[in-house]
Structure formats: C-alpha cells, structure tokens
Amino acid sequence: MIILNKETIKIETEQDAVFLRKRVTEYAAKIRMGLVNQTKLLTAASELVRNMLRYAGKGQVLCEVISVSVLQTGIRLTFIDKGPGIKNVDEAMKDGFSTGKSLGVGLPGAKRLVNEFIIKSQVGKGTSVSILKWKNG
Amino acid sequence: MDRIPILKMGDFLLVTVQVDLYDRLAVGLESDLVNMINRHNARGVLIDISAVSIVDSFMGRILGNIAQMSKILDAHTVVVGMQPAVAITLTELGLPMTGVHTALNVEKGMELLKEKIWATNGVISEEDDNPE
C-alpha cells in the first residue's frame, strides 16, 4: 500500500467540518472517485465529525490518499479525538443506539457507507475511527 | 451567522438551499421556517435541495422535523430536487424520511402542494380530473 498524500486537519468548530468536506471533495476529484462514492464518503465523514464535536469537543482528521495498485486507489480518513471514549463499542455500533439525543444512525450508518471501518476506543482516553472508501467499490 | 433565505409567495413559503448545509444552518432554517409559517399563515412549504451535495442523519432529521412542525401548524412540506447520489446515500445510511413529501423538481413539488391544500380544504375540483 502506497500513501500518495497525507494531511491533518484540525477540527474545533463546525466551520472546520465544512473545510474538511471541501478538502475531501478535492481529493476525491483528483482520484476521479464517482459521485455516489464521493457522496457516501462525505456523508460518513460528516457523521463522524459531528460525533467528534459533540462528544469530545475537538479532534483531528488524518486524510490519506492511498493506492494498492494502478486501478485501486481510495481515500482513508482517520478521526482521532481525546474525548471521553465509548464505553461499549458494540452497543454504539447498533442501529438506534444513542447516549445523546440523536437517532442513533450515525456510527452504524457511516459503517454501511464505506468499504472499511475500524473503531478503537478507550474510556477516558479517546476514540479513533478510520474509514476507507475505494474509488471503485 | 449565515441564514438561508425564505421567500413568501401567496400561501407558500419557498426555500432554495444554495449552500452546503451544516448543523447550525439547518437548525436556523428550522426555527425561521416555523416562525414564518406562523406569521404568514402559510399553507405550504417547498424546500429545494437540488444544490445540496450531502444530507446526513442530522440534516435528514431536521427536514423531518420541519415537515412535522409545519403539519402541526396546518401547512404541508415538500422537499424537491434531491440529487440521486444523496438519495442513494440516505437510504444506505438507514434514515427513515417518514412524513416528508418529496417531488422530483420545483414544478412537480408545487403541484403536489396545491393538491394537498385543496384536499384539506375539501374543495373537489372537477377540472383537475379532466384537463382540457
């Protein structure tokens, strides 16, 4: 796996989320990701940024353009925060579960929209969620 | 703070979202719309989201809220112009857009709103069944 591009974006306000959206759109256009895949990736990112802002207050997103072959390129986004962490990750991944007042579709919904979804969380230390969307996938 | 403009046209309120939505903007729109419905006795709300490239669970919920609130205030809501990629994503995300009426474009949305208002007014217009 080759990392073609790497950038860290700090997330502190909702405006930063808008900026992240723009950057990811640019990267997606660069690798010619289709519109549907691009929309799915951006929507998943939007869910995860909201979670980060709501539960941890701030954090950062690592954007990577990765390639495994000439044909297979994609975008990987890693959301890292130092928030309270998730007590029960399995529970949080279930549809309809929320400790906030939301609908509880954010995390499981985001997982459905991407090709790879890795979540790691430690109570009191923080959460990291990594999503990957292939250009054709 | 940014605001999405709301236009009044007769009994209707028209909203064209020309920017990408973010949470605070959507929440602002929700409260502005409900206030406008109340102030102008609006009977229908048409929201054009053809320029919106993503709708996630939060914004979807706001659209649902707007539809529900306006229903309580005796107004109908139609969301028009959703991009196909957004529709695909919303469905896969698993967001039930219950109670939100949709139409393909502004024209069809207006027709739907008029039909709905006529239906609730109890006016049976025969002309509609037999267009000349």
Image (spheres, coloured by chain):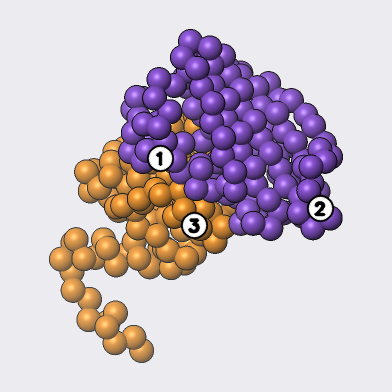
Chain colours: A purple, B orange
Q: Chain of mark 1?
A: A
Mark 2 is surrounded, within 10 Å at the Cα level, by few (under 14), some (14 to 19) or many (20 or more) other residues, namely few
Labels 3 and 2 positioned on one and the same chain: no
- Determine the CA span between mark 3 and mark 2: 31 Å
Labels 1 and 2 positioned on one and the same chain: yes
The image shows a total of numbered marks equal to: 3
Image mark for residue B89:
none
Q: Nearer the viewer, mark 1 or mark 2?
A: 2
- Three-letter residue code for mark 1: Val
> At x 49% / y 57%, what residue is drawn?
B87
| Residue B66 in sight from this viewpoint | no
- Determine the CA span between mark 3 and mark 1: 16 Å
Mark 3 is surrounded, within 10 Å at the Cα level, by few (under 14), some (14 to 19) or many (20 or more) other residues, namely some
B58 or B50, nearer to the observer: B58
Q: Position of residue A105 (x, y in %)?
A: 40, 40
- Three-letter residue code for mark 2: Ser
Q: Chain of mark 3?
A: B
Q: Position of residue A4 (x, y in %)?
A: 84, 40
Residue identifier under label 2:
A69
B52 or B72, nearer to the observer: B52
Residue identifier under label 1:
A105
Q: Is residue A112 left or right of residue A24?
A: left
Element class at badge 3: helix
- Three-letter residue code for mark 3: Ala
Residue identifier under label 3:
B87
Q: Are marks 1 and 2 in contact (CB under 8 Å)?
A: no
